[in-house]
Image (cartoon, coloured by chain):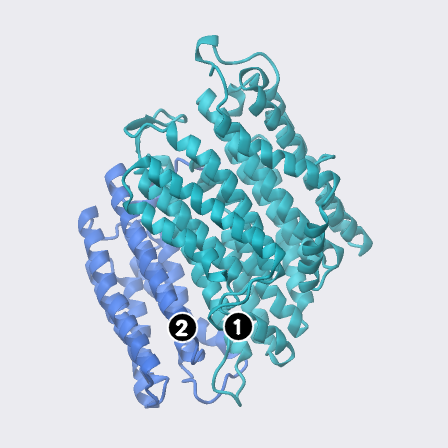
C-alpha cells in the first residue's frame, strides 16, 4: 500500500505522456489525484506497513507532509483541468511584455505534473537518506518543464535558473548525505546503513564533527530548494513565471518537501545530542529569510513575485520555529499546514486575476471585488490570512512561534520577528487592498461575465480550511501535529 | 594497489586543472569524459581487490553514463548551440588556472582538519574530492555560456561522487543507481533547456538572461 501511493501517480504520469485524447488524459489526472488522496486518508486511519525492507515507510512527519501534498494536489487538479480547458493549443501572448509564445504540449504538462506528485510522495515516504535525495532531485527535474509551460523567454530564463541553482544546491545536499554516512561509519563494522530509523537508534555512536559538517551541507543543499535566504534567488522567478496552478504546488507542497529533508537531518543530529548546533543555524537562516522577504516585498509591483517572496518569509518562520525548539516546533508544524493551504489558495486566485486583467502589475488592477466577486473576496481573505491576521490559521501558528521565542527569553529574536511581520503586512496591504477595492479598472466590455466553477471552488475550499484551522484544529490533526513535533524533540 | 589508486587520483586533479584552463567546449567535454572513466577506476581502487558484483555494476554504470553518454549528449548540445568556445569569462583562463591550482592546497588544508576515517581510505581521496567540488563551483560562477555551467555542475558532481565511493562502502545499489539516473536526467533536461535557450535568444550567454530581476 505504501508502494501504491508512489506507483499510482508515477505510472499515471508515464501513461499521460502517450495518451492522445485530452478527455481521457484529464480523467486520468483526476483519477490519480483522487486515488492518491483516498490512499492518504486511509493512511490516517491505519498506518501502512513498510515496504522494501523499510526503504518506504510512513512515519508521523511523513504522513503530515504527505497529507499537505495530497490535499493541495487534489485542489490543483480541479483548478488545473479548468485551466487546461481554456488554454488554446496554438500561439498565446505573454501578459507581461506581449511576447508571443506557444504552450508546451498538454500531454507533457500532465505527465510532468503527475511525476512531480510521485516524486514529492517519495520524499515523504522514504525512510532512507539516499532515496530521499534521489526523490528530491527528481522533483526538480519533473517540475522544470512545468515552469516552462508557456514557452517564452521569461519562463525559459526562470526555468534555467531553477534547474541550475537547485541542481547545484541539491548536489551539495548529496555531499551532506555522504557525510552522514561517514559519521555513522564504525571501524568495527563493514557496512553502513543510511536508514533513518537505524541512524536515530545509533544516535550516540555517531561522530559529532562529521555529523555537524553533514548538517551544514544538508541545510545549504535542501535550503536552496526550500528557498531559505540567501539561497532563494531562483524562487521569485520560478514562482512568478510558471502557470498559477504550478506556482501553488511549488510554493505549497515542494518547499515543504525540502523542509522535510532538512528535518530528517535534524532528527539525526538531535539523536546524537547536537540539536543546539542545528537550532542556532536554523534561527539565523530563518531570521535572514524573513528580513530578505520584507525588503523585497516592500515596493514590489508584481503581485505574483510578492506572493513568492511571501513564501520566503514563511519558510523563514518554519526554520525559526524549528530553531527555537520546544513549543516552536509544534508551531512550525502547524504553520507548515497553514502556510501551504493559504499560499496555494492565493496563487490560484492570482491565476484568476491574471486571466481577467491580463497583467501581473498590481498597480494596474483595481476593483477586483466588482469584476470577480468571488476571487476578489478570496484575495482579500487570503491577504488577511497570509499576513497572520485573526481569525485565520496562520495567526495561530505565528503566535505560537512568537510565544516560544518569548518563553525562552529570545527577546531580540522576538522583536525582529514582529518587526519583519509588520513590515511585510504594510508592504502587502498597499498592493492587495488597492487591487481589491475601488472602481473596476477593466472596461465593461472586457469583463468576464461569470467566474467558472472550477476556477473558484478549489481556492474557496482551501480558504474555508484555513479559516477553520484558525478557529479549531480537528483532534486527529492536532494529535498528528503533536506526534510529529515530539518526533523532532518538541511538544 | 595504493600507489595505483594515488596515480588515478592525481590524474583526476590534473583533469580538474585542465577544465579550469581550457576554453574549447569540445576539449572540455572530452576531459570530463576521461574524468568519468577515472571515477570508475577510483571505485575499483578503493575496494582493495574485493570486487563484488555490486561494485562491478556500479563501475559499469559510472563509465557508461559519465564516460560515454554525457559526452555524446553534451557534444550534441554544443553543436546545436553553434558555439565552440567559452568567450570572455568573468574570470580569465589564466586566472582560473591559478585559482584552480591554489584550490588544491586549500582543499588539503581544509580536509586536514577533519577526523580520520580509517586506514583503508587513500589520503589523497578527500582532498581530490574537495578540489573537484571547488573547480565545479568556480566554473559555474565564472563562465558565461550555459554549456560551461553544465560542465561545472558535472565536475562538482564528480567530486561528490569520489567522496561517496571512497568513504561510503556498501550503500544500497538501488540508491547509487538512482543517483546516477538523476544526474543523467539532469544533464538531459539541461541539454534540452540549452537547445531552447539558443533557439529563443540566438545565444547561450546566461549573463544576458536578465529579464527577471528586482
Q: Which residue is mark 2?
A: B129
- B120 relative to B105, above or below: below
Determine the secondary structure under disc 2: helix
Circle 2 chain: B
Q: Position of residue A26 (x, y in %)?
A: 38, 38
Visible residue check, residue A310: yes
- Same chain for marks 1 and 2? no
**Callout 1: few (<14), some (14-19), or many (20+) C-alpha neighbours within 10 Å?**
some
- A32 relative to A76, above or below: below
- B214 relative to A51, above or below: above
Mark in front: 1 vs 2: 1
Circles 1 and 2 in contact, beta carbons < 8 Å: no
Of all chains in the rendering, the one displayed in blue is B
Q: For residue A458, which quarter of the picture?
A: top right
Between the residue at mark 1 and the residue at mark 2, the CA separation in whole angstroms equals 25 Å
Visible residue check, residue A230: no
Q: Position of residue A415 (x, y in %)?
A: 76, 45
In the picture, measured across the screen, residue B67 lies left or right of residue A96, that is left
Q: Position of residue A281 (x, y in %)?
A: 63, 60
Circle 1 chain: A
Q: Residue at x 44, y 9 (%)?
A: A445
Q: Colour of chain A?
A: cyan
Q: Which residue is mark 1?
A: A195
Amino acid at each position: 500500500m505504501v508502494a501504491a501511493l508512489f506507483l499510482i501517480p508515477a505510472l499515471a504520469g508515464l501513461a499521460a505522456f502517450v495518451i492522445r485524447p485530452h478527455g481521457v488524459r484529464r480523467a486520468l489526472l483526476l483519477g490519480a489525484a483522487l486515488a492518491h488522496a483516498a490512499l492518504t486518508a486511509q493512511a490516517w486511519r491505519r498506518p501502512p506497513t513498510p515496504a522494501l525492507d523499510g526503504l518506504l515507510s510512513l512515519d508521523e512527519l511523513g504522513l503530515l507532509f504527505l497529507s499537505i501534498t495530497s490535499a493541495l494536489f487534489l485542489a490543483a487538479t480541479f483548478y488545473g483541468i479548468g485551466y487546461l480547458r481554456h488554454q488554446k493549443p496554438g500561439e498565446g501572448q505573454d501578459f507581461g511584455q506581449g511576447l508571443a509564445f506557444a504552450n508546451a504540449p498538454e500531454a507533457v504538462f500532465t505527465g510532468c505534473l503527475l511525476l512531480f506528485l510521485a516524486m514529492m510522495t517519495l520524499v515523504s515516504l522514504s525512510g532512507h537518506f539516499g532515496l530521499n535525495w534521489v526523490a528530491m532531485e527528481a522533483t526538480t527535474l519533473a517540475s522544470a518543464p512545468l515552469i516552462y509551460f508557456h514557452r517564452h523567454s521569461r519562463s525559459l530564463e526562470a526555468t534555467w535558473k531553477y534547474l541550475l541553482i537547485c541542481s547545484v544546491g541539491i548536489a551539495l545536499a548529496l555531499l551532506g548525505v555522504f557525510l552522514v554516512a561517514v559519521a555513522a561509519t564504525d571501524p568495527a563494522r563493514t557496512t553502513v546503513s543510511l536508514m533513518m530509523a537505524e541512524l536515530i537508534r545509533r544516535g550516540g555512536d555517531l561522530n559529532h564533527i562529521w555529523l555537524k559538517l553533514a548538517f551544514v551541507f544538508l541545510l545549504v543543499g535542501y535550503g536552496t530548494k526550500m528557498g531559505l535566504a540567501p539561497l532563494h534567488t531562483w524562487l521569485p522567478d520560478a514562482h512568478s513565471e510558471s502557470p498559477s496552478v504550478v506556482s501553488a504546488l511549488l510554493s505549497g507542497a515542494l518547499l515543504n518537501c525540502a523542509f522535510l529533508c532538512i528535518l530528517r537531518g535534524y532528527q539525526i543530529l538531535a539523536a546524537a545530542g547536537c540539536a543546539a548546533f542545528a537550532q542556532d543555524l536554523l534561527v539565523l537562516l530563518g531570521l535572514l529569510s524573513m528580513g530578505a522577504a520584507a525588503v523585497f516585498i516592500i515596493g514590489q509591483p508584481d503581485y505574483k513575485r510578492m506572493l513568492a517572496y511571501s513564501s520566503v518569509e514563511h519558510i523563514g518562520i518554519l526554520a525559526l520555529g524549528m530553531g527555537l525548539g520546544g513549543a516552536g516546533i509544534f508551531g512550525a508544524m502547524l504553520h507548515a499546514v497553514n502556510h501551504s493551504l493559504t499560499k496555494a489558495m492565493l496563487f490560484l486566485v492570482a491565476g484568476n486575476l491574471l486571466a481577467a486583467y491580463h497583467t501581473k502589475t498590481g498597480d494596474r488592477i483595481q476593483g477586483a471585488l466588482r469584476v470577480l466577486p468571488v476571487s476578489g473576496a478570496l484575495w482579500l481573505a487570503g491577504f488577511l490570512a497570509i499576513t497572520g491576521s485573526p481569525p485565520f490559521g496562520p495567526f495561530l501558528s505565528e503566535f505560537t512561534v512568537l510565544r516560544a521565542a518569548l518563553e525562552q527569553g529570545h527577546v531580540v529574536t522576538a522583536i525582529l520577528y514582529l518587526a519583519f511581520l509588520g513590515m511585510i503586512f504594510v508592504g502587502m496591504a498597499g498592493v492587495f487592498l488597492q487591487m481589491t477595492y475601488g472602481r473596476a479598472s477593466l472596461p465593461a466590455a472586457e469583463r468576464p461575465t461569470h467566474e467558472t466553477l472550477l476556477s473558484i471552488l478549489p481556492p474557496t475550499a482551501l480558504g474555508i480550511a484555513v479559516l477553520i484551522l484558525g478557529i479549531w484544529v480537528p483532534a486527529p490533526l492536532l494529535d498528528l501535529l503533536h506526534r510529529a513535533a515530539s518526533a523532532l524533540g518538541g511538544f | 594497489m595504493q600507489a595505483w589508486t594515488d596515480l588515478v587520483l592525481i590524474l583526476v586533479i590534473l583533469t580538474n586543472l585542465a577544465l579550469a584552463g581550457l576554453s574549447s567546449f569540445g576539449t572540455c567535454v572530452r576531459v570530463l569524459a576521461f574524468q568519468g572513466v577515472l571515477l570508475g577506476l577510483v571505485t575499483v581502487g578503493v575496494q582493495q581487490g574485493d570486487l563484488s558484483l555490486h561494485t562491478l555494476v556500479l563501475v559499469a554504470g559510472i563509465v557508461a553514463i559519465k564516460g560515454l553518454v554525457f559526452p555524446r549528449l553534451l557534444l550534441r548540445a554544443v553543436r546545436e548551440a553553434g558555439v565552440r568556445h567559452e568567450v570572455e569569462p568573468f574570470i580569465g583562463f589564466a586566472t582560473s588556472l591559478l585559482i584552480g591550482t591554489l584550490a588544491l592546497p586549500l582543499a588539503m588544508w581544509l580536509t586536514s582538519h577533519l577526523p580520520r576515517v580509517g586506514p583503508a581510505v587513500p589520503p589523497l581521496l578527500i582532498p581530490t574530492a574537495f578540489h573537484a567540488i571547488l573547480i565545479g563551483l568556480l566554473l559555474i560562477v565564472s563562465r558565461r555560456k550555459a554549456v560551461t555551467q553544465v560542465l561545472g555542475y558535472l565536475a562538482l558532481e564528480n567530486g561528490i561522487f569520489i567522496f561517496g565511493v571512497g568513504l561510503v562502502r556498501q550503500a544500497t545499489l538501488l540508491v547509487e543507481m538512482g543517483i546516477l539516473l538523476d544526474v543523467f536526467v539532469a544533464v538531459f533536461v539541461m541539454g534540452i533547456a540549452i537547445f531552447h535557450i539558443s533557439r529563443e535568444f540566438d545565444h547561450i550567454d546566461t549573463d544576458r538572461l536578465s529579464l527577471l530581476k528586482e
